[in-house]
Image: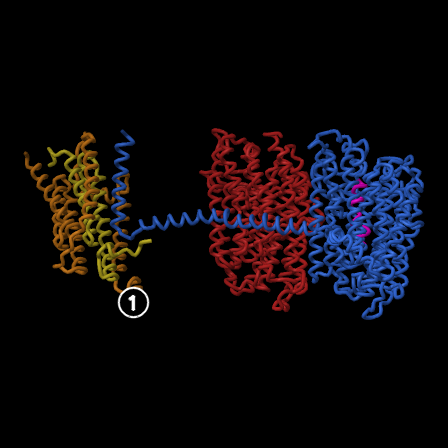
Chain colours: A orange, B blue, C red, D yellow
Amino acid sequence: MIANQIMFFLLSAMIIVFSVLTVTSRKILRAAVYLLLVLVSTSGLYFMLNYQFLAAIQLTLYAGGIVVLIIFSILLTSHISQKFEPTGWKKSLLSALASAAGAILAITTILDFKFGASREAAMEVDMHAIGKSLLSLDYDGYILPFEVISILLLAAMIAGIVIAKKGGPADQESQNLKQ
Amino acid sequence: MINFTYTVWILIIPFIMFIFLGLAGHKIGPKLSGLLGTGALAVITALSYITAYKYFFATPKAGDVFKAILAANTTWLQFTDKLHIDIGVLVDPISVMMLIVVTTVSFMVHIYSTGYMKGEKGYERYFAFLSLFSFSMLGLVVAPNIFQMYIFWELVGVSSYLLIGFYYEKPSAVAASKKAFIVTRFADLGFLIGILLLSFHTKTFDFITLTDPSGPAIAQAGGASFLGLSVITWSMIFVYLGGAGKSAMFPFHIWLPDAMEGPTPVSALIHAATMVVAGVYLVARMFPVYSLAAPVALKVVAYVGGFSSLFAAIIACTQTDIKRVLAYSTISQIGYMMLALGVSGYGGHEGLGYMASMFHLFTHALFKALLFLGAGAIIHAVHTNLMTEMGGLRKYLPITHLTFLIACLTIAGIPPFSGFFSKDEILAAAFQSNKILFAVEYAVAGLTAFYMFRLYFNIFWGKETQYQHTPHEAPFSMTIPLIILALGAVFAGWIPFNKLVTSDGQAFESSIEWGVAIPSILIGVLGIFVAMVMYRKENNIPERLAATFKNTYKLAYHKFYIDEFYLFVTKKIIFRYISEPIAWFDRHIIDGTMNSIATVTQVVSFRIRKFQSGQLQQYAFVFISGAVLLAVLMIYIWYW
Amino acid sequence: MNILTFFVVIPVLTITGIILVKDIKRVKLVASIGMGLQLLLAALLVVLYIMQRRAGNTEEMLFIKDFVWFKSLNIHFALGVDGISVAMIALTSVVVFAGVFASWEMAFLTKEFFVSLILLATGVFGFFISIDLFTMFLFYELAVIPMYLLIGVWGSGPKEYSAMKLTLMLMGASAILFVGILGIYFHSAPDGEPLTFNILRISNYVIPIQAQRVFFPMTFVGFGVLGALFPFHTWSPDGHSSAPTAVSMLHAGVLMKLGGYGAFRVAIFLMPEAAKEMSWIFIILTSISVIYGAFGAMVQKDLKYINAYSSVSHCGLVLFAILMMNKTAMTGAVLQMISHGLMTALFFALIGMIYGRTHTRLINEMGGLMKIIPFLSVCYVIAGLASLGLPGLSGFVAEMTIFVGAFQHPDLFHRITTIIAITSIVITAVYILRVIAILLLGPSRDNQYEHMNDAKWYEKISTVILIACVAAIGLAPFWLSSMIGTSMQPVIDKILAVNPF
Amino acid sequence: MNAGIPIQFFLILATLMFFVGVYGFLSRRNLITILMSLELVLNSVNINFMAFNRYLFPHKMEGMFFSLFIIAVVAAEAAVAIAIILNIYRRFTTINVEDVDEMKY
């Protein structure tokens, strides 16, 4: 067994274990920490696949940004010590069955399928190439989606502010309801 | 050839007058309206007389025959290449004769009405309706094709409806008008079906083509048959249904006595002299077809006519409302005319009945109008319709009395009055062809004399009645028409109808058949005598007689319960057992089906709306399970 | 610009105008001017049409104009008229014009009312000028939708129920109809040629008989529901009785004619073989309609119900005549559509006016109105006489054309059904005279009605114009009948060409 | 660096992660946990993209860019979702998904 295989199985085990913990943990803050661990392990996978840039992004944006955001919102809405009531067995069972069925279906399909290996030479994904094609107007260029995403992010930012703002339309309405 | 185009004015003038009086009558006031209406009638009366003179005496005959002349004709509505409704004027012996009858009586009635209707509310309306009636009746008379006749047939129906219901605030008048319209409408349905059948087989509406003895209608006689009778026979029977309705033949007679709810001059004009004889005119119009192609239909005409005349005469003997007596007498007399047509043959002396019928139509129009106008003058004087409330009026109403007596003698068939001549011809015709009907007619002649003189004696003699205020003679505007019509009733018998109005247009010789006439005179006199015994002085013979024949009397008094039978059929059967179930069926079954479709949809949607629970995870669960299921289906079932 | 486009443009402009102006008076003014212009335009169209025909133009449709709309599906905005559509357009403009005046007293949401009303009219006009099936259907829907609002908002009685029922039934029919239209579309050309919605183009090509057998009943029933085909007529009594005056007028007067016109123009014209084959079913249904509607009307107590059932009867006659498939009967059908449109509009206008005064529509509660409101009563009598087919008024002309035409059919079955249909004239007389006797004649039943005013000027305009049209057609039917008949000729030729009797 | 590891391993890993996320989405009541489950789902998709890119089309960068954009979208989504959750919390004083069922029939 070579090192990268060991590495892969280690990461996989971490991902799966922490994923399961994320969705089963009865303390929400712990769930967030488990999620963080999942995301970090995932970035390890990216490193393994030789996508350093994306791994970095995964770490900073996902693990750093989003998880922090989630933790903040947890702090705003819940008590840290609060424990959830366990999920009803009926509901968990049904969900588990549906998920398991889906998983089995997907896995059998994957195992049935013969993936042909690529004969092309692997491309070196360095920062230079990424930057170039991200800003390129060519056929392979991604300038348009890039711009669209930037606008989307801006819009999401504004939307987040507007929606979460106190005294927004929803708030007034709830006050009207109280009256 | 003399030009008769001007005859279209006979139609145009009253029509314009109707529109004008109808729209502007209340603006110009009653006096001017009456004057205008009467004036218009005077003009068309003059035109009619000129036409008659020119047609009978100034137009050269083609061989011995009076030719039918199409004075004007224009296509009004095109159906197919061959079938089209034309509006036009046909001048031939019977149409000219009818022109004379209609305009004369109508003119008299107009004059009479200016006095009779004075001060009535709706005076202008009355004259407008009279103009409408004159227009439609004249249009009917001059119709050159059967469809024009049908059009004006309907129009006279509606003007009759409007005039019967003239006193529209009186419920009985409203009911009577409705009844008249619906009964005749029902008969017209037969007429229309007859027209359609006829036109389907002959491809024409035109009278000249239809009645041409060698034309298609008559040639079709041996054609397709249905239930043992030829199609032409069937269509002629259907056409006759229309005529029977308008002419109040049994069993469509029920509307006519009720129609007396209208103003009396209207009864005189429409329900005695002109409109009700339209049925006779129709049969006469189609006579060659009846005679040559549909003898069975003609037989039906004869028997229905004979039965109606007897039936109505019996009822007339028991009625007390003078207008109703006259109405039944009208039915009886029209039955005479129908019978005369029915027993007639075609051409030459064979056509005696046809000539007699037209002759009687003519004289009857005069004396029946006279009777009605006289009755109007009486009612005008004493303000009641019931003869039981009258008596001894001869002193107060001398002119009316005299003219009424003349009319009664005329209708009883006493020579030398006109009724005698025409009735004699009818009896002679019946004698030649059908002895049963002949016997019936003798009986009717006696009954006629009896009930007319019963009326006469009851009104003018009988018990002395105290009136609330002394009756006085009618104004000149009313008595002058009486006198003119009385003169007509006296002298019309001398008109040589056998030279002028015959079935095939050719003159033939006929003389009074004394062998038939003398018994009929005797029977008439007998009737008069019986009436005189019973009613001249107040006595109790009538009551005793009525008590003796209690059941018969009761039956006749209640008009043989025909009205009740009709009421039963319409109210009970049609309304209750057809219409109401249909209305119920529509609301509950058909509409109920539609509603229940809607209800089912609604119930189902209430059930399935529970799926929309608002539970996000439930949706997601369904979605994912569904997706997995679909994937399984796609992968393992479709492709394997 | 083609004259026909104005028929859609003017109502749209009128609607814009109504939306722009402020007070109620001006709304009514704009509406009446707009519809008055439309009336003049219709008159102009009639004149132009007749002149063109006189000049010897024998094309099937005149004033043809074709705009491509959706290229991929070959949908066009194709316009064109023949004598039949010209007559229907004239009818519509008269009824709409009268309807505007009949709703002069509308006080609640006046602006919106007139907007919906004229929107409805736009749909109807558009329907009659279209010769493209798709645009035809589009305008048809455009006419049906405002009806829901008009009844639901401005109606009386159980208005929501009636509006819903009417709309759902008509929409259900539309769904069937749309399948039928698509069926025609997908069989509208021989293999290889582009499919088309154009009626004239389709009529030159024989749709395969198997397809006709499926799509003819769909189209016919789809349109038939709007034409009150038994047993799909029950929306009519409820809808009419709840609708406000002008809407009843338009609906019974014009909208129901869309059914007859469509059944003729689409179902029979495009699929004559199947029509010939299946007509017997529908002839039975329509002759039931005729008799059944008349009997149903006989015992009703509500004026509008009486008239609604009478419409069922009369419109049944329209479909009946169309199914006879010969020139005279079909000409009669168009005449009957026009005649019924005018007189039923007149009826509903008068009923609305009477209702506005007495606040009841039950005939038993009224009586002796002739004395109190003579003008309206006389108009009502005239309408009644027209309805029972009095010569000199339009009903007679139409009915006689139908009866004579239908009776010329060589088939005994058709002639027997004709006789059955003819009996309706008696029943019609019974229920019309019953209403007149109870409602108008006799003594006044209730003295609370003694002090009613007779017609106002706008009511007079509304009734007089309708009566004038009814009488004009009744007195001089020749030009109208020949205009329709000439246009009917090519249709008949096509029917006969493929399937001679 | 991926020698000896077949592509199926990556795919199975992603699948498992995906369905664990689905399970979380279906079973948890807290909106924020649900959001976290969603993050798992999206992350598993990213892994798939990367694996496909590396194994099947190593000469291209589509997969990577897709992941990149997905991460950006996820960021936006998380921001908006959290804003919504905060709003719901203010409105209903709970973030239990079963209590937020205003949008039923």
- Mark 1 surroundings: few (<14), some (14-19) or many (≥20) residues within 10 A: few
Q: What is the quadrant of the C terminus of chain C in the image?
A: top right
Secondary structure, mark 1, is helix
Magenta segment range? B269-285
* Residue type pointed to by label 1: Lys
In the image, is residue B283 part of the stretch drawn in magenta?
yes
Residue linked to disc 1: A178
Pinpoint residue D3: horizontal percent, then vertical percent: 11, 33
Q: Nearer the viewer, residue A41 or A74?
A: A74
In the image, is residue C207 part of the stretch drawn in magenta?
no
Residue lying at the far bottom of the rendered structure: B469
Q: Is residue B397 left or right of residue A79?
A: right
Tell me, yes or no, if residue B199 can be seen here: yes
Residue C286 vs A85, above or below: the answer is above
Pinpoint residue B368: horizontal percent, then vertical percent: 84, 53
The secondary structure making up most of the magenta span is helix
Residue B33 vs C86, above or below: the answer is below
Q: Chain of mark 1?
A: A
